[in-house]
Image: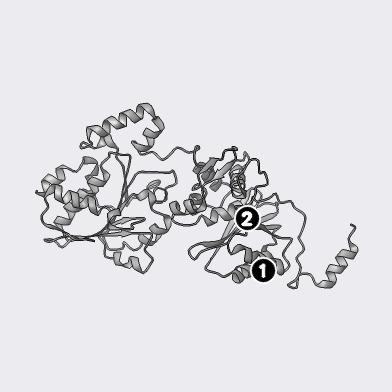
Amino acid sequence: MNNQTVTARIPQAFAPLLTQKKRIKFYYGGRGGGKSYAFADSLLLKGRMEKLLIACLREVQDSIKDSVYRLLCERISFYEMKDYKIAETKIENKITGSKFIFKGLRDQDIQKIKSLEGVDIAWIEEGQSISKKSWDILSPTIRKDGSEIWISMNREEENDPLWVLLAANPDDRTLVVKVNYYDNPFCPQELKLQAAKCQKESPDDYLHIWLGQPLAQGASKLIAPNLVRQAFMGKISSSDSPLVIGLDIARFGDDSTVFCFRRGRWCFKFETIKKQDIVSIADYCQGVINDYSPARIFLDAGGVGGGVYDILQSRGYRDIIRAVNFGGKAILEERYVNRRAEMWDNARAWLSQDLPVELVLDEELLSDLCSVNKKYDAKGRLQLESKDEVKKRLGRSPDKADAFVLTFAEPVYDRGKITTYGNGQVVIEDMFKQNKESKW
């Protein structure tokens, strides 16, 4: 089959894939828009015209079956493109030398991904599942002059990482196109009938599934993106409220230990350290106490956090440090399944205040805070999905959000400067003197 026949099968909405030169070509929409077929046909066509290295990428690819490999093979067969040779892990054009390769991004580190430096076109399928971490590794790697990144996706949430990073406010080098089933002249009649039925019976599902709108907020999300973005625009420059620090301690090699600093309605700082043992984390925390004199530090005591807590207790910081168990009983046990749900809901209430609040402007923090789904148990108590489920969807642990919500573990009142014991802060004689002078 000749190239003109292939071109005729590509819907007009996808013509820019072949005719425009853009660094990013971002296509999104609902079911039936033909994005995958149009991308596959366009890339096969371009691969017949010149020698190209084309990388087909997903967030997770456990096997070649998880990739668009099968779709490309089907399109090659449909068009009877005998110039393409199909191997077990790659596809090559015997005339031009073009090659298609297939990779999962989550499994790639800086060294492994260097094999993509010579890529001419990277096709990211199911872009809604790509994490910011994967994008930050991939984007500078596709560096060849004139190289392009093609993205096809059905939006899931308002804060899908690639949407926020690329499509929400596109620059001059980014093409953003929405395509739905009614834009696709080759959409099967059966799909059109299904869309019409869905529109009549479930309008909200129709908007998401068939028109490509993100999932409606409220029913499943605990914290809506608009609350976080509103807090990003706060103009609070100082606060007299006591300093409260949330400390989320890394449990695994890829997680980060994060300190969140908040004074009342002003969350003004995050500090992050990576790959530190418990003694080093305790040393760092001691430095934070000495530098900032917080009224309270709420520390995640799960996993290795218990060891950090014990060290700081032994060093005389028992009046400042409080251990928090995310899975422990809530203070308001009749309303929350556990402490984690209670703290997250307290953070949501803080963001919803009538008085303005301010958060550090951080898109990763936005993703973290808006990543958690809610539900209710048989007693009507608030319950959150597990952290493992959140981590699987985000591609990372929501460490910044956990540090932030820890600042809402308990109310903290201004009681003046808290006394610390040991480490040269208060000597033993002073401790006895304080007890002698005490009025109680």
Using a 10 Å C-alpha cutoff, classify the residue at mark 2 as few (fewer than 14 neighbours), some (14 to 19) or many (20 or more): many
Name the quadrant containing residue 314. Answer: bottom right
Q: Is residue 203 above or below residue 24?
A: above
Neighbour class for label 1 at 10 Å: few (<14), some, many (≥20)?
some
Q: Which numbered disc covers residue 311?
A: 1
- Residue 379, percent from left and from top: 60, 38
Whether residue 22 appears in this view of the structure is: yes
Query: Which of the numbered marks, if any, corresponds to residue 241?
Result: none
Q: Which of the two discs, 2 and 1, labels the residue nearer the N terminus? A: 1
- Judge left or right: residue 314 versus residue 42: right
Q: Residue at x 38, y 65 (%)?
A: 109
Q: Position of residue 116 (x, y in %)?
A: 30, 64
Res 325 label: 2
| Amino acid at dot 1 | Ile
* Whole-percent x, y for residue 119 in the image: 26, 62
Mark 1 and mark 2 in contact (Cβ < 8 Å)?
no
User: Which colour scheme appears in the figure?
Assistant: one colour
Q: Is residue 203 left or right of residue 316?
A: left
- Secondary structure under tag 2 reads loop
In this rendering, position of residue 202 left or right of residue 7: right
In which quadrant of the rendered view does residue 35 lie? Answer: top left
Residue 309's quadrant in the figure? bottom right
